[in-house]
Structure formats: structure tokens, C-alpha cells
Image (tube, rainbow, N blue to C red):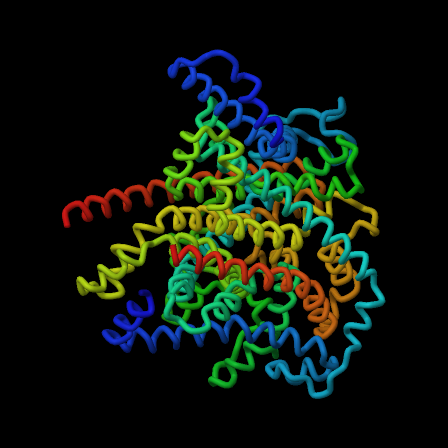
Amino acid sequence: MATRQLALPARRRAPDTSGARRGHRARRREAAAGWLFTAPAVVALIVFLVVPIIMAAWVSVSDWSGIGSPFSAGVHAVGTANYAALLTQPGLPQQDLGMSIRDNLYYVLLVVPLQTALALLLAVVVSRKALRGRGFFRTAFYFPSVTSSVAVSMIFLFLFADSGVVNGALGFLGVHGPQWFTDPNGLLHMIARGAGIRPPAVLTGHGLLGLSWWDWLAGPSVAMVTLIILAIWTTSGTFMLLFLPALYNISEEVEEAAIVDGAGPWTRFRRITLPLIRPALFLVLTLGLIGTWQVFDQVFLITQGNPAGTTLTPAYLAYQVSFGSQQWGQGAAIAFILFGIIVIFTVLQRLVLRERGSVTQARGRGM
Amino acid sequence: MSPAAGQIAGRRNPWLRSGLYLTLAVFAFLYIYPFLLELGTAFKTETDAVGNPTNPLPHNWVVSAFSQLGNQDFPRWFTNSVIVAVFVTLGRILFDSMAGYALARLRFRGRGAVFAAIIAVMAVPGVVLLIPKFLVIRTLGIYDTYPGLIIPLLADATGVFIMKQFFESVPASIEEAAKIDGAGVFRIFWSVSLPMARPALMALTILSFQGSWNDFSDILIAHENPSLDTLTTGVGRLVSGQLGAATEYPLKLAAAVAMTVPVAIVFFVFQKHIMRTGQGALKE
């Protein structure tokens, strides 16, 4: 590729000398390079992501049973039947989808803010030049990210076992630890019960997607809490790594000028660091949001959606429905519903961040 | 200069300094201790592992868990993991940085559409693509081959996104100077922009190696021949097949240790590079 690219100008160098023409030629060369540079990535994405998406879209509106090609003559279009079974018709598929969305929603609401905040905290601390042994700490914090989900799942199965490390530590503090992987009680329900609140009829009588509003408000189950802790522990190192280049790019002069001006650490963080690392923050939140809605490995390896469906996620449900129950159409439909959820959340997050950005800029100008 | 700044901050706010080290100590413990337990328990007997879970030191050091693992196809799985991870990483570094550079710097028709497509593709849940991906791999005739394990993993929208974001955060002035000097697009990319992108490239290298080394589902659907198993699918099958019901913590954690060690070595090698790059960036 290098030779082709370098040969291009030589071949065309012949007569023209006018500046305008040269500019035009340069622009065309740049356009050709642009396509050439993006071609390998684009081809790979088309063949292994776009084409499969089209096939999955077809499967989600078909009655394909998993045998033979989904495009063979025996496969029929069934319109929106698969989606209807999940979204509008009361029944088990709808209830499973409702549970999976609820469980995953609590997972996202807890994991994304906590992992982003922790990653930023670790990155800020570790990027300080005055810190002793920062290489050691950076390694320690990033290391869980290097470990495979298979290995981490095994460690967590060991740590959160009934008579395991975590319950041992809790027992030391005088707390009787729960049976982490088999406790389906939602945290919010437990708090409500502790406060003596009985489920009001308004909430138990009505609902959405086969779940009463009271069930929607259950909060993450004890079992889900272990998966949430696992996710935060595993991913904050990855995101710390993405914050570090941005933090290194902040010029020390600005930082020192602020110190001389008497700005405290919190002010410096809010007025200098945060605005300057906005692209990295945007990246981390985007990746975090997309990743947490796709949680699959840990569910597959540790809980299989149990106990009582409180660790079900749409990604795992889609797998279970298609590979397990051979309902390929419904499985693909779940995945597309999940896709819709991710798009909505990403757009929302974009809007929120953009607004905050303009506020900060306005304030900066006012100063 | 910076130590001075650190001293100023430290003198002005001793609370900040002690708070900083306390935070570090707590988090370092939370991040390191589970691995010490993993390592120690792998060398324990079953009764010792269940009886003293919080003590990372075995009562008697035994390697029975590892010799049990050694009876499996470990060397073959290891070789396969290396082959997949190396090719995927090299491919991604080249393709992602080229595409990211083009999307950040070069003006060409369709650039906005390509970027929008990449964002859209990033949001697509990978799980739904497993079966269709399997069908595509079969159709291309690369099922049960190394290319079938490697090529699908080269499709990496996230890496392109990371590189684009990075190139956009680097000022274009040096490239403009090179352009005025008459350097071609590829030359500017290769000898000016890419060296400046070292922090991002290091991050991409680690993310790619780790991602492909630890990948389970994509590898699983691309082969059925056991001789193509990587460490993840090999250990995964071993665990789900034989250990599913029993606790057998030493064996489980020995498997976890064995699959973590190689990627840890690669990580430690690159960690030095990251630090050097980081310090270089600071000095500038």
C-alpha cells in the first residue's frame, strides 16, 4: 500500500504548474487516500458486521428454525409477529423481556456512573508526577482489565461464595453476609420492607411488559450486585487508561498558573481538568453505556439469569431464546429491541453532555 | 518544574496529600488482594481452599491443580491464542490508525457517512451477530481455519473511533508544515502523525491484544475442531464440562492463573512503554 500511495504523485507530476490546479489535484489525491485508508476497516465492517446485521434483521421477521440457510425457500416472513410476542402480547416471552430490561437498567444506572467516576479518580491520582510508585499503582488498577472474563468470573465465584472471602470479612465486622449468587431480593424492596412499606395497590395492580410497577421498582437483586461490583472492578482500569493520554496533554503551565492564582484542587479539577478532557470523558461514557447494555459473559458464566430472573439481561436472553429454545426469530428481535435501547440512551447522553458543555463555556466566558 | 508544583500543592494542602495516599492504599488493596487469593488458592488443597478462603498463603503448597490442567491440551490452546492475538493486534493497529487518521484529517466525499456508519456499528449488540457471523464465515469457506478465527476480529469500529478521537486532539500544524514541504499523504501519516499517536497506539495495542486473547464467543462460533481451541474456549469447555457442579476452587483458579499469566507478561512489557511515552509527553 505504501508504494502505491507514494507512486501516485510521481506518475501525475507531468506539466501543470498553476497553483489552482495543484490545489485541485492535491484535493483529489487526498480524497483517494481517504478512501484507501478507510477501505480495509470499512470492508471488514461490512462483511462481518453490516451483512450479518441485514441477515439478523431478516431472521427477526421470519420463522427460521435454525436449520439450513435463513434465505432458503422453506423460510417465511411472519411480519412483526416476533416483536408482537415480546412487546404487546401478555405472556412468558414478554415477561422475560421486561425482567431483562429492568435488571439491565439497574446494572447500567449503577455501573456507568461508578466506573466512570472511579476511572477518572484513579487516572487523576495516578497521573500526578509527584506521586511515588505511580507505575505500580497504574499496573495494579489496570490489571483486572487484562484478565479474561472467564478468569475473573472464577475469582468472583470464589470471593462471593457462601462461606467465602467477602462473607468472612463481613462476619468479621459482625454482619451476616447473604448468599450472594442465589438471593433474588431487590435492594429497593429490601429497604422498603425495612421501613415497613407495604406494596401499594396502585403499583402492584398496573405495570409494563408483564411486570407490575412494584416489580419494576425492585432495584438490583443481591445477585446482580455481585455482577455490578465485578463490572466496576474489571472495567475502571480500561477507562483509566483512556483518560491518561488526555490528562498528560494538559500543559503544566496552565496547572501551575492556576496554583499560583490560588485555585484549590477541586476548582482546578472542575475548571481546568474536566473541560480539557471532555473528548475522553465522552468516549468513556459512550463505551461504558454501550458495553453495559451488552453484558453477557458474566451472566452466562456465573448466574445464567438466575435467581428468579433477577440477573437476566437482553443480551443473554437473546442468546438463550435462540440457541436454547431455537426461537431464532424472537432471539433476533430481542437483539434489535436492545439495539433500539442502546441508540436511545446514547442519544440522550449526547444531548445531556452537549448542554452541560455549553453551560461551562458560557461560564468560562463570563469569568 | 513539576516536582516544584507538587511541593507547592503538598505544602498548601497536607490533607490532600494524605488523602491521596489513603485512597491509593485502599484501592490498591481492593485490586491486588483478589489476585493474591487466586494465585495462592491455585496451590492449595481442596479442603484448605474451602476452610481458609481469606488466607492467600496455602497451608501446604501443592501443584495438583496444575498437573490436572497439564493433562489437558494446554500447549495447543496456548499456541492458538498467541496466533490469534498477534495477527488480530497487528491488523487492527494498521487498519484502525489508517481509518481513524483519514476520518480525522483527510477530506473526502463520504467521510461523514463512514463515521456515522462506524458509530452505528459500535452500538450493535455483538451477541445478535453471532449466528449471522457464523453463516458469513461458513459462506466464505473459512470455517474451522485460522483466518476464520482472525479475520472477523479485524472488524473493530471501536478502535477506529479511538484513533479518530486521538488524531483530532493533536494539533494539525506539524502535518501542515510537512504538506507544504511536499510530503505525500501516506508519508505524512507514516512518519509524522503515527509517531505522535504513540500514546493512543499503545492503548490500542493493549486493548486489541487483551480483547482477542480473552475473546470467547467469536472464537467459539468460528470453529468446531478442538485443535483450533484457544485458551478461553479450551478452559471454558473444561470448566463447563467437568467442574460445573463441583466447587473445585484450586482447579478453577489454577485455570484462571494459567490463562492470565501470558497476557500479564505482554501487559508488563507494554506497561513500560506506556510509562515512557507518558513521561516523554510530559517533558515536551
With A128 as the anchor, is A327 left or right in this view? right
Seen in the picture, residue B250 relative to B238 is either above or below; the reply is: below
Number of numbered discs on residues:
0
The residue under the point 51% across, 40% down is B191
Q: Nearer the viewer, residue A174 or B29?
A: B29
Identify the residue at image location x=77%, y=34%: B138
Can I make out residue A87 in this image? no
State whether residue B283 appears in this view.
yes
**Picture coordinates of residue B57, whole percent (x, y):** 65, 84
Residue A90 in the image, given as x and y percentages of width and height: 55, 41
Asked if residue A279 is positioned above or below residue B265 in the image, the reply reads above
Q: Is residue A80 above or below residue A11?
A: below
Q: From the viewer's side, name the closer residue of A10 and B190.
A: A10
Q: Residue at x 70, y 75 (%)?
A: B42
From what the image shows, is residue A338 above or below residue A304? above
In this view, the residue in front, B251 or B73, is B73
Where is residue A235 shown, x and y percent of the image? Answer: 51, 58
Quarter-wise, where is residue A350 in the image?
A: top left
Quick one: which residue is furthest to the left in this view?
Answer: A366
B236 relative to B102 in the view: left or right: right
Quarter occupied by the N terminus of chain A: top right
Instruction: Give the percent coordinates (x, y) of residue A358.
Output: 25, 42
Farthest-out residue, bottom: B59
Look at 29% across and 69% down and name the residue there. Answer: B4
